[in-house]
Amino acid sequence: MSKNILLASLAGIVVVVIAVAIILSTQRGAHIELTGKILKVRTAPIDDASSIAAVDFRVTDPADYAFMSKAVTLVVIDANGKEIEGSTVSEPDAKRLFDAIPLLGPKYNSSLIIGEKVPAHQTIDRMSSARFEVPDSVLEARKNLILRIEEVDGRATAEFKEK
């Protein structure tokens, strides 16, 4: 192989690598996602057969575009490994719930509601609450709790685990 062909091949490879690096760097903020963590979980009985879970969390939108929520879901994994999905409580009902059940303590943050935007490159603190058709003892003995936030266009689903 001649020296000229080798130099031309190496130059071509360098140009392709530079082009790929430029394309990837310009697309870095285009991926819609949320990062974050669950800060606090509180549970309380409603009656003998049902209970409530209130979850405070912090999320960050690292993308160049706002993340608009479509649905917020709480799922408890009980001591046997069974997933139990809760019925999400609306913001007005959550306010009444915290007033009616002092065991939950104060309501620190507003609920993340459908259609709410997490602005690009910003962090927000929110909460979500859900009713579970199981006794409070099942929630207290849980293996884990999962918070799912779906994006309105269906392009992303953020999932945060308590443990």
Image: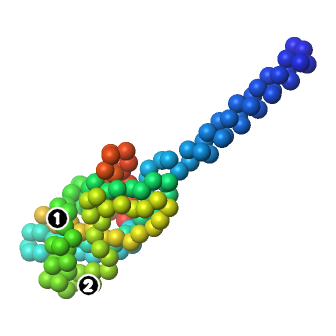
Which residue is at a point 29% across and 74% down the rendered structure image? Answer: 110
Horizontal arrangement in the rendering, residue 20 relative to residue 159 (left or right) = right
Q: Measured from the top left, where is residue 103 in percent x and y? A: 21, 84
Screen quadrant of the C terminus: bottom left
**Front-most of 25 and 75?**
25
Closer mark to the observer between disc 1 and disc 2: 2
Q: Is residue 111 above or below residue 103?
A: above
Distance from the alpha carbon under mark 1 to that under mark 2: 19 Å
Q: Measured from the top left, where is residue 92 in percent x and y? A: 18, 73
Which residue is at a point 42% across and 64% down the rendered structure image? Answer: 59
**Front-most of 55 and 161?**
55
Q: Which residue is mark 1?
A: 132
For the view shown, which residue lies furthest in the right direction?
A: 3
- Residue 105's disc number: 2
Residue count near mark 2 (Cα–Cα under 10 Å), binned few <14, some 14–19, many ≥20: few
Residue 99 appears in which quarter of the rendering?
Answer: bottom left
Q: Measured from the top left, where is residue 35 in percent x and y? A: 45, 59
**Front-most of 95 and 84?**
95
Screen quadrant of the N terminus: top right
Q: Measured from the top left, where is residue 159 in percent x and y? A: 37, 56
- Residue 47's disc number: none
Amino acid type at mark 2: Gly
Mark 1 or mark 2: which comes first in sequence?
2
Horizontal arrangement in the rendering, residue 96 relative to residue 151 (left or right) = left
Residue count near mark 1 (Cα–Cα under 10 Å), binned few <14, some 14–19, many ≥20: many
Which residue is at a point 18% across and 67% down the rendered structure image? Answer: 89
Q: Are marks 1 and 2 in contact (CB under 8 Å)?
A: no
Q: What kind of element bears circle 1?
A: strand
